[in-house]
Image (cartoon, grey):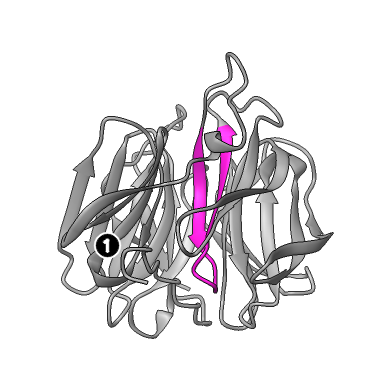
Amino acid sequence: MNLEIFDERICLLGEGPTSSGQANNAIMWVDIIGKKILTRDFFSGITTEELFHEEVGFALPGQDSSVVIGFASGIKYISPNRPELSLPNWTKISPEKPGTPVRWNDAKISPHNQLYGGTMAFDATPEAGGLYRISSDGQQIDELISKVSISNGLDWSPDSNKFYYIDTLKYSVAQYDYDESGISNPSTLISFPHGDVLPDGMCVDAEGGLWIAFWNGGCVKRFESNGNLSETIELPVKNVTSCSFGGANLETLIITTAALTNEDNPKAGMTFMVQPGVIGKASNLYSSPLTL
């Protein structure tokens, strides 16, 4: 496999890559701490970059060029042709603990058009976050998992029957049964050694393999749906944050990284790409309540 640089722009905390468009050409990701949303066309190389006044925990593509954004202050649905819409925020049901500011950190749209997103404390205070679900009509928010420390990678199996979730400081991947009503029957699919290498963002490919980025680990690893390790992709930087498939036939893995620490590497914070020999799943595009 030939690892290449996909985008040379430096992100303090690159996260949450997605793909959309007819040929999965529109690649979008966030720089959470840099307060940016970045895009790059997979084929033309055309880029955009938008700076905001607060941290951006996630940006998810929707139908008709819309985007749903998880700002530190709340979630916004933004469309070029419709009024801006605020979605319910986690503070509606989980009041912030005094002295523990919390923000969104990673999210995806479920197979049933629900927004699944997690939170964490800015200073990573243990058990200050949670995992939440916003209903498909954009009216209801529910807490699915409480006392989460660093809500990170999440995705569904290709048949949509399983939900996978990483709370980083638990050093594991949890597996749940999934249907439209929610998640149930938790079990531990993969356990990692406790230490300085932390499981971070994640995506699932079309064969059911889990691709997991490792903070301070300098790699992305693929695990079979039974939890067995099947592939390791080494990167030239330490802090690898997340990954997602994009491009023609979803055959290219897009990998985000972070330059937040004092790593002595000019490539830290760049976004990389590789063709690992399997194809991914298409991102679920959000269908706004304004268009339902």
Residue 106 seen in render = yes
Q: Residue at x 58, y 14 (%)?
A: 99
Considering every residue shown, the one lying at the far top of the view is 99
Magenta stretch holds residue 78? no
Query: Secondary structure under badge 1?
Result: loop
Which percent across, then down, holds residue 122? 52, 27
Image quadrant in which the C terminus is located: bottom left
Q: Does residue 58 appear left or right of residue 83 in this picture?
A: right
Which quadrant of the figure has residue 154? Answer: bottom right
Majority secondary structure of the magenta segment? strand
Where does the magenta region start and end? 103-120
Which percent across, then down, holds residue 287? 38, 69
Which percent across, then down, holds residue 184? 79, 63
Q: Is residue 226 above or below residue 183?
A: below
**In this view of the protein, which residue sits in the foreground, 24 or 143?**
143
Which residue type does callout 1 highlight? Ser
**In this view of the protein, which residue sits in the foreground, 169 or 160?**
160
Q: Residue at x 16, y 71 (%)?
A: 44
The count of marks equals 1
Q: Does residue 145 appear left or right of residue 30 in this picture?
A: right
Q: Is residue 244 above or below residue 126?
A: below
Q: Residue at x 43, y 41 (%)?
A: 258
**Residue at the disc numbered 1:** 66
Magenta stretch holds residue 105? yes
Which percent across, then down, holds residue 82? 20, 59
Label 1 packing within 10 angstroms: few (<14), some (14-19), many (20+): some
Q: Residue at x 52, y 23 (%)?
A: 101
